[in-house]
Image (tube, rainbow, N blue to C red):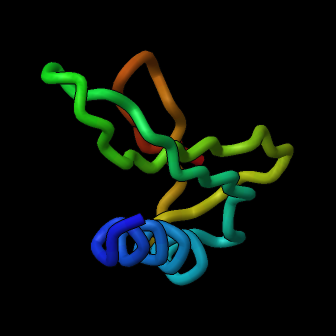
Amino acid sequence: MSRSTGKAEEWIVNINQQKIQPPVKLDTRLLQLPDRQGNNKTVIYVEILRSIMVHASAGRYYQRVGSTKQEMKP
C-alpha cells in the first residue's frame, strides 16, 4: 500500500465521521487490480452498508434516484 492510498482511505473514513450524521457504516478494502498494461494498482473499494436510518449531509437529506441524488423534501 502506498502512503497516498492510506491517506485516501483515511480521508474517506474522516469525511464519513465528520460530515454525515449519523455516520454510515462503511466497509473499505484495499484491492490490487491490473491496469491495461497488466500492472497491479491499488484501489479502494468502499461498500456502504444498508441502513434503516436517514443520514444528513451538509444539513440536508438526500435520496438516490438512479445515478443522481435528489434532496428529500419534508
Q: Establish if 38 lies above or below 10.
A: above
Q: Residue at x 74, y 43 (%)?
A: 49
**Which image quarter is the N terminus in?**
bottom left
30 and 55: which one is in front?
Answer: 30
Count of numbered labels shown in the rendering:
0
Q: Establish if 60 lies above or below 51.
A: below
Task: Place residue 7 in its image quadrant.
Answer: bottom left
Q: Residue at x 43, y 43 (%)?
A: 71
Q: Position of residue 26 (x, y in %)?
A: 67, 56
* Residue that protrudes farthest toward the right in the picture: 52
| Residue 67 falls left or right of residue 29 | left
Q: Residue at x 44, y 40 (%)?
A: 32
Q: Residue at x 65, y 58 (%)?
A: 55
52 and 29: which one is in front?
Answer: 29
Q: Position of residue 31 (x, y in %)?
A: 50, 43
Q: Position of residue 69 (x, y in %)?
A: 40, 35
| Residue 55 falls left or right of residue 30 | right
Task: Place residue 47 in its image quadrant.
Answer: top right
Q: Establish if 63 lies above or below 44.
A: above
